[in-house]
Image: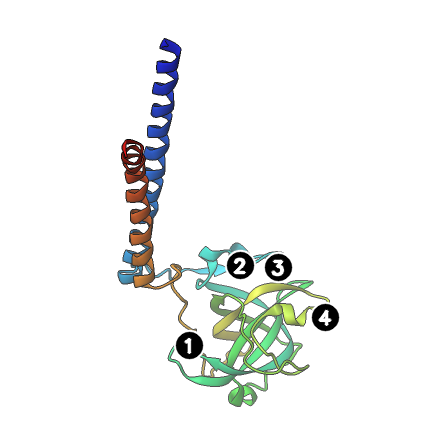
């Protein structure tokens, strides 16, 4: 008899623990979605980092660009070994234009895509030849995933080094650099530069989508708390 009572008490305590644990999980998930909704409505103010980093400090040619490195200012140097047209690109002001994109060999066997400026201005700096060493600064950007045009030997469908893997033996950096300045031995190259596109928020989804998830998780928490009482009531009936 005592053993039966003890087993009953143990089962009830286990049930209580399970109910409280599930309730805590659902409430926690609701609070998490509430925080994400608040981030959508009031995004955190991130201080502007004006430091110009050596490219190798923020990225390597053997992996993707780390998230904290995206949007940072970088500097590197090397030789332009190829030139491409990148049609239908959208800058930070929302203007659509064709961009001039070069492949910069910046080490012995590595290279990175560099946005030099507008395609229509490509003849403004004839002093930059493939034998000319250039030093550049710019903004490190993530690769694009959507095609903007047809990919050809002289045209890039998107700014993504993976589409050039079969066209070169160099190790290619992920992402690309939007130039802010370009220096050669004879001085700085003056031309119109491209304003980098605005980077999207790190919080996916929409404000009301997150609020709906809050409601869902908290309703589940209420149902879990109510379930034992419903079971008792059903047993009495």
Tell me what residue is drawn at x 34 percent, y 34 percent.
Answer: 19
Q: Mark 2 or 1, which is nearer the eye?
A: 2
Q: Are marks 3 and 4 in contact (CB under 8 Å)?
A: no
- What is the spatial separation of the Cα atoms under label 2 and label 1, in whole angstroms? 20 Å
Q: Earlier in the sequence, mark 4 or mark 1?
A: 4
Q: Are marks 1 and 3 in contact (CB under 8 Å)?
A: no
- What is the spatial separation of the Cα atoms under label 3 and label 4, in whole angstroms? 16 Å
Residue identifier under label 2: 65
Residue identifier under label 1: 195
Above or below — where is 113 with respect to 107?
below
Badge 3: how crowded within 10 Å, few (<14), some, or many (20+)? some
Q: Point out which mark residue 62 bears.
A: none
Q: Earlier in the sequence, mark 3 or mark 4?
A: 3
Left or right for 165, reference 5: right
Residue identifier under label 4: 166
- What is the spatial separation of the Cα atoms under label 3 and label 2, in whole angstroms? 9 Å
């Amino acid at each position: 008899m005592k053993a039966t009572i003890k087993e009953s008490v143990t089962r009830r305590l286990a049930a209580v623990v399970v109910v409280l644990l599930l309730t805590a999980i659902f409430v926690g998930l609701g609070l998490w979605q509430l925080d994400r909704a608040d981030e959508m409505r009031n995004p955190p103010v991130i201080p502007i980092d004006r430091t110009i980093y050596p490219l190798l400090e923020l990225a390597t040619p053997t992996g993707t660009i780390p998230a904290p490195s995206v949007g940072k200012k970088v500097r590197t140097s090397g030789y332009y070994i190829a030139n491409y047209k990148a049609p239908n690109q959208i800058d930070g002001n929302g203007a659509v234009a064709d961009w001039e994109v070069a492949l910069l060999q910046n080490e012995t066997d590595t290279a990175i895509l560099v946005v030099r400026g507008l395609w229509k201005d490509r003849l403004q700096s004839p002093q930059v030849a493939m034998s000319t060493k250039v030093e550049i600064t710019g903004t490190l950007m993530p690769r694009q995933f959507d095609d903007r045009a047809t990919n050809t030997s002289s045209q890039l469908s998107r700014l993504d080094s993976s589409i050039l893997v079969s066209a070169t033996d160099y190790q290619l950096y992920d992402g690309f650099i939007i130039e802010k300045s370009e220096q050669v031995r004879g001085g700085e190259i003056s031309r119109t530069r491209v304003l980098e596109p605005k980077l999207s928020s790190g919080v996916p989804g929409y404000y009301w989508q997150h609020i709906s998830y809050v409601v869902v998780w908290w309703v589940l928490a209420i149902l879990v708390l109510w379930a034992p009482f419903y079971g008792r009531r059903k047993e009495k009936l």
